[in-house]
Image (tube, helix red, strand yellow):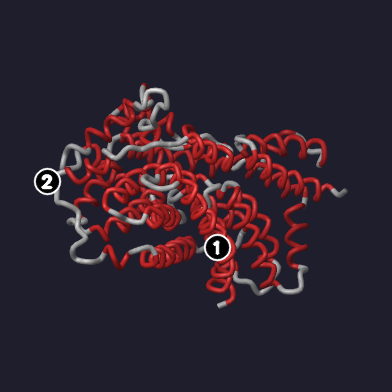
Amino acid sequence: MSSHMISIYALVAMFIIATILPINMGVLAFVGAFLVGTLVAGMQTKGIMAGFPAELFLTLVGITFLFAQAQNNGTIDGLVRLALRAVGGRVAAIPWIMFGIAAMLTAVGAVSPAAVAIIAPIALGFAAKHGINPLMMGLLVIHGAQAGGFSPISIYGGITNKIVQQAGLPLSPLTTAFASFGVNFAVALLLFFLFGGFRLMRPARTVPRHTGAGLAMAAFAMPKVVPAQAQRIVNDAEGEALTEETPAMARSAQVDPATGGSTGGGAAAAAATPAADASVSDNLNVHQLATIAGLIALAILTLVYKLDIGFVAITIGLVLSMMAPNVQKRAISQVSWPEIMLIVGVSTYVGVMEKMGTISFVGNSVAGLTSPMVAALLLCFVGAVVSAFASSTAVLGSLIPLAVPFLQQGTGVDAIGFIAAMAVSSTIVDVSPFSTNGALVLANAQGVDRDVFLRQLMIYGAIVTVAAPVLVWLLFIVL
């Protein structure tokens, strides 16, 4: 067996193990890089570590650190509160408010599961209280999180753009961002009307008006219960425990099965306190306004002045830390270390594959297929199927580099369109109940038969996994 095939089989084995067992794939990838690099490729440690993505590591740490501060100081809850007040009692607007907030969170740097963990309990609580189809509400939250997932300052966007830039391929971050938003918005619009949107738009369908922040308080008062079955699905699907992957706000409201009371305490409870306090006031405080200004500054400095997003995010985070040092302590612990470990581990392993020549080998093999268009469709299908069961970030970090030689050989496939298609097909499938996002929606659904709800999510996830690659292939590659 050739060294190229050994490295490919090792990568496949990592996906399988991380799917079956709750083991972070980044740990598997680091061990794989060490074993394959030394035993198969005869590389020295320095050569293996040359593939470590230091710039991407800084980007991920900076963005998630800044977002954790925004969560802890109540900025996110304040924006949710203001958005809910803007509904003006119209029930039909609530699913779209949730879609928009989830998109905003991922667009400014939240990992997708974190955004869903924050919004899903609120959204599904409203759905149970006001007769909104819970499947529709949950799917709109997930598609909202994916819609904003490829902004130039987001986690997915940062990963994709860094890989494409390093490969020397044509880069259009806004094309990928708008492609993701457009496809997810169109799907959400279809779901809205399929699952009762017309009924919600009737004039009589209004929320009883509350004064001040009462509407938001009603939302946050909804219980958030994470059943053991759904918790297990989360752990098995991504190989990362929910309590490690999501912000303290999502942890603090879990219910103790023995007492029926909240298990949130210690650091988790303390982290949730600012959010609870913020929901009482109608206005954003100085720290929250400074956080919003910092997020705006992050977009301007990175998009207009082309400054490094990691350094800028950490600098803004430091300024916010000087204003509230206690928030900074919690934010450090809430940086998405499992996601970062996964991404940099897979990137390091892909670096070893690149030095071995495996990347070029795969690219040449794909390019040798009868039709480049068929090859592009095949890669989109592989991304969708693998991502439905494994981590989307791992898929983006491994499949896009494998496609680089194929795109560089003048096959006639537009690189910008292909990257957009691969990005969408590899993330839109996170509606699957075997992914973290789908499991979070299943866990927080209220007033439903969970077995029926699970089947509905599985059927919808299967439809998306089959249909999405074909749709994006037609939209961004063929047309």
Q: Residue at x 39, y 36 (%)?
A: 225
Q: Amino acid at mark 2?
A: Thr
> SS of the residue at dot 1?
helix
> In the figure, 152 relative to 467: above or below?
above
- Picture quadrant of residue 384: bottom right
- Is residue 81 among what the camera can see? yes
65 relative position to 36: left or right = left
| Mark sitting earlier along the chain (1/2) | 2
> In the figure, 179 relative to 154: above or below?
below
Residue toward you, 94 or 185: 94
Residue 451 placement (x, y as % from top left): 49, 47
Residue 315 placement (x, y as % from top left): 38, 38
Residue 290 placement (x, y as % from top left): 25, 41
Residue 182 placement (x, y as % from top left): 43, 66
What is the C-alpha distance between the residues marked 1 and 2? 43 Å
Residue toward you, 18 or 121: 121
> SS of the residue at dot 2?
loop
- Is residue 161 among what the camera can see? no
1 vs 2, front mark: 1
> In the figure, 337 relative to 161: above or below?
above
Q: Residue at x 26, y 59 (%)?
A: 93
Numbered-mark total: 2
Badge 1 is on which residue? Answer: 463
Badge 2 is on which residue? Answer: 211
Q: Residues within 10 Å of mark 1 (few under 14, many from 20)?
A: few
Q: Amino acid at mark 1?
A: Ile
454 relative position to 110: left or right = right
Residue toward you, 419 or 268: 268
172 relative position to 281: left or right = right
Q: Residues within 10 Å of mark 2 (few under 14, many from 20)?
A: few
